[in-house]
Image: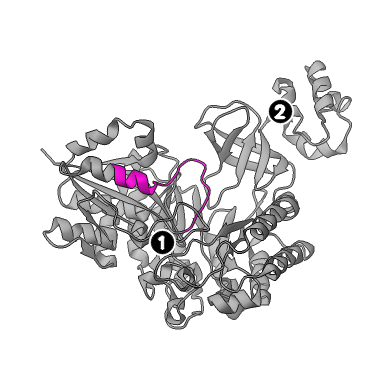
Amino acid sequence: MMSEAVIIDGYVDEPACLGVPPYISPYIRTIAGVLKEHGYSVRYVTIDELRKNPLAVPKLRDASIVVMIAGVTVPGKYLSGTPATLSELQQIGFTLRGKSISLLGGPIGFGYSPQGGERAVKEAVSGWTAMLIGEPAAALDSYLSGGEPEGMLSYADYDRWAVLGAEIILQHPFYPYVMCELETAKGCFRCVTGGCSFCTEPFYGMPRMREVFGISAEVAALTKAGARHFRLGRQPDLLAFGTSGSEYPKPDPDKLRSLFTGIRMAAPDLQTLHIDNVNPGTIARHEEASREALRVIVDGHTPGDIAAFGVESVDPVVIEANNLKGSPNQIYRAIEIVNEVGAVRRHGIPELLPGLNFIGGLAGETAETFALNKEFLNRILTGGLLVRRVNIRQLMPFEGTRAYENNCLGIHDKLFHQFKDDVRSTFDVPMLERVFPVGTVLTGVRIEVPGAVSLGRQMGTYPILVGIPMQLPAGTLLNAAVVSYGARSLTALPVPIRINTLSSSALKWIPGISKKLAQKVVAGMPYLDKSDFKKVVVSDEVDPLLPLMEY
């Protein structure tokens, strides 16, 4: 009888890797591959499942070995999962002590902070048999082979373990709606100059690139296990894939074309193929090569994609003090180029748009910094450009980065929150109206949080939060038409919009229908057709939704 191993997914969020549901990180899948290679049967459980059933934690002691992956180096807000806290890691470790071999790995090794705006504390987490040092899967393999729990990245081994561990996704609570984060590279070209002052990616050194055949083999194994949703997320700059050399290498469109072709061949029925990080400094310094590379992405991906830009600040003083990626004009030019290639719509939504990240608390920050950042966003609005989302967070500095000692944490907290609130009210809503006009149909919205207003998202990279003003069960899958806007969210109604079945609380979200008029609409039900309905709702605001209505 095979010995049982348990993987606990405490979730990870790094500058170049996301593993919070519906995402599953590459760490989990390669760890599963190592365990299978060493003859274990593997069980997978998330930290959220353990929270719901605390009695399951002591039962983990029956396993021969327990491996937990955890760690957040980029603070975020999450809808369907909450990363493991330090106290939870310690509690689980102490519960397992003396009963099972227990190993803890992932970015938690860099330190822990409960939130942005606080330094991460680097300390040993008590109770565990050992920490996995370096590449978690390689460290686990070394330990199970009788060596120390330390390991260096080798893509020859990684590729094999990724294929062996692909079936672990079958145990994910969201399966088959699981977004498989794919690794294409680890490390950062900018580490030659120290990288951005706050970033943990330079800890991995200069980039090491996976070969296309290894990525394609992993995708084929995931597809065989039922995966249909993929993101090329585990790398700091996708445009640098297959390149080498300078701090800002020139993109190689042919290498990217081979990558997307290989993935498409391995997963001919995929439903989502998105990307994550793109360095705006690369685009600004290599306009033509970047433009061609972006076209390759648009040809190979699925629409609704985001190229995440680590802007952090457009204050020249902050840029210089923190070795950021580009000047304000370079960042703006990169936004223009992505718009040139990606703002075209397919199935009603833009193909590929920039997503901007800002950080408060960096060295050199002054009151002027927030004014400059706001002016930059206003320039985007007045310039008629499209941006899919703006992330604004506070610095979470880690030991070993320059920002750990040199920062402005706590100095401008009030200005930071004012800036964030201002962006949410004056930038986000008009931009969402521009990106998702009323009547835009979002396909494949999956309800994750039921309620009077049920919250759901599409599968994708940074999917927009969609509120459906109806009580719907978790897991419901539907198409929905945009009717209204909030800060970083949309309100939508299921398509077709069955007017004669809607409550007044749902009708009031339709443009041109006030709360009072919604009650009048309900009183006049049923309506025979569009003209009958328009006798009551005469506003032209409702017109974009009329083709989507049934009576």
* Classed neighbour count for the residue bearing mark 1: other residues with Cα under 10 Å, few (<14), some (14–19), many (≥20): many
What residue does disc 1 label?
Answer: 262
Question: Residue at the spot x=42%, y=47% of the render?
Answer: 83
Residue 286 placement (x, y as % from top left):
58, 79
Q: Toward which corner of the image does residue 289 lie, by quadrant?
A: bottom right
Question: Residue at the spot x=72%, y=34% of the render?
Answer: 548
Q: Farthest bottom residue?
A: 246
Q: Earlier in the sequence, mark 1 or mark 2?
A: 1
Q: Main secondary structure of the magenta part?
A: loop
Q: Is residue 82 magenta?
A: yes
What residue does disc 2 label?
Answer: 506
Residue 82 placement (x, y as % from top left):
45, 44
Name the residue nearer the viewer: 244 or 413: 413
Q: Is residue 266 above or below residue 452?
A: below
Question: Residue at the spot x=62%, y=27% of the render?
Answer: 452
Name the residue nearer the viewer: 160 or 77: 77
Q: Nearer the viewer, mark 1 or mark 2?
A: 2
Residue 446 placement (x, y as % from top left):
53, 37
- Give how far apart the Cα atoms at labels 1 and 2 are: 45 Å
Q: Toward which corner of the image does residue 367 lie, by quadrant?
A: bottom right
The span picked out in magenta is 74-91
The answer, for residue 286, to whether it is visible in the render is: no
Q: Is residue 107 above or below residue 153?
A: above
The answer, for residue 13, to whether it is visible in the render is: yes
State left or right for residue 543 relative to residue 43.
right
* Classed neighbour count for the residue bearing mark 2: other residues with Cα under 10 Å, few (<14), some (14–19), many (≥20): many
